[in-house]
Image: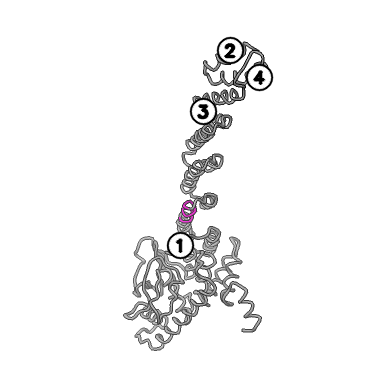
Amino acid sequence: MGLFTRLYYIVKPYTDARERQVALFFGGLTERSSLASTRARLLELLQQNIAVINLWSEYKYKGYTYLTKRERKKLYTNLARITSEFDRFWESYDSPEGDERRKLLSAIMEYCSGPHGVYQYRASSSFGRLLVNPAEGPLVGDCNQIVTLYIYLYSRYFAVTDLRLRLLPGHVALHYNGDDIEATNGTIAHYDHEKNNVLMPIEEIVSINLLDTTDEYLATHPIAPKDFLQSARFASVLSHDRDIVNRNLEAAYITITKQLMDSHNYTQALAFAKQSRDVELLAVVGHNGALYFMDRHQFTTARQYASHALKRADLIHDSYEAEGAYYYNRKKFSEALKAFETAGNRQAVAKCYEGLFFAVQDTLPKQLTSENVRNYRKQIARMRDYAKRSGNKELVAHVDRLRQYL
């Protein structure tokens, strides 16, 4: 590597040319990208190094802040150690298999999950947690992560297109020539009779990993909305099966929207709920957002959210009632009056006119005489109007006594 190249990778976010290739690929994806050329390029990158695709996408599009440039370099070093150790294992591997590809897969199964296997299953994990130094401890990960490692080890010897993916609800396994390979325990299975199983091309692993929002890191480090949006967009472009992507997207939208509501970020929660086109999710955001902003006396904003709720009319009515009470208690009777009138609360409207009456009365001097009363003709006229509107006969009678001196 020349001096210029070394300097380039010092200042850029990529660890090396492999990450730069992956970054350029993702950066160039749009909903209008050609599916044929996009998937062809994706297969090239999978064949070169699926681990780079996974680490870069976790870092860039899933908010894994622990995957710094320095940390990714360390993980690539660990991957090289795993690779070297497996190569030595493969060289001495003895199997009656005649099919070299099947023999390689058997060796990977034995290496990972045999009597002295290096892999240990743990649900809800990230790919970075799998890539440890095998001399220092087990490789820990879930089904997505170990399947990704299987693909990487296999790709160093044969074409990844030899393999396919068996997808089941909440689970993924490899498939080769009629057999399903359960990577989590290194056994052969036959999932074709299981409910809701789907056989997919190998490149589907990328969209599956992009949309995986169940791991333990995300429980304490929510995905940044902009990162989630990018991963969801890329997954929709790259996936072969619209039904699978839509199911994953639905679950992911619910997860990220709940995270945003929990952190009271209703602006983005509403934006994601709209993008999801999930009427129920949108209604929940509308309802919760309306209550949240009512509690903070932001009544106009509350009504904007209430318009998306199922019981929108009730919520909007409640918001006007709450707004009227808020202003009335602060003696802002004009504002309270408008809110109560909109809510149709005639009794509260009358109380507001009484409040306006006394507010004007407080501007009069404490000692009104027949000589100075004429100076307050306009105020007395307003008091009479408010008294009549309030329906309070005692107030009307009081103003009428004052008017005798005008």
Residue 392 locus on image (x, y percent): 52, 18
Element class at badge 3: loop
Q: Nearer the viewer, residue 400 or 198?
A: 400
Indicate which label's residue lies in the foreground, 2 or 3. 2
Element class at badge 2: helix
Indicate which label's residue lies in the foreground, 1 or 4. 4
Which mark is first along the chain, 2 or 4?
A: 4
Query: Predominant secondary structure in magenta?
Result: helix
- Residue farthest toward the front in the current orientation of the protein: 367
Mark 1 neighbour class, 10 Å CA radius: few under 14, some 14 to 19, many 20 or more: some
Label 4 is placed on what type of residue? Answer: Tyr
Q: Is residue 240 above or below residue 316?
A: below
Mark 2 neighbour class, 10 Å CA radius: few under 14, some 14 to 19, many 20 or more: few
Q: Is residue 64 above or below residue 72?
A: above
Q: CA distance from mark 2 to mark 3?
A: 32 Å
User: Residue 34 in magenta?
Assistant: no
Numbered range of the magenta stretch: 255-262
Q: Is residue 354 above or below residue 250?
A: above
The residue labelled by disc 2 is: 401
The residue labelled by disc 3 is: 344
Q: Nearer the viewer, residue 84 or 337?
A: 337
Residue 61 locus on image (x, y percent): 53, 64
Q: Could you tell me which quadrant the N terminus lies in? A: bottom right
Which mark is first along the chain, 2 or 1?
A: 1
Q: Nearer the viewer, residue 111 or 76?
A: 76
Label 1 is placed on what type of residue? Answer: Leu
Q: CA distance from mark 3 to mark 1?
A: 47 Å
Which mark is first along the chain, 3 or 2?
A: 3
Q: How many marks?
A: 4
The residue labelled by disc 4 is: 376
Residue 203 locus on image (x, y percent): 49, 70
The residue labelled by disc 1 is: 218
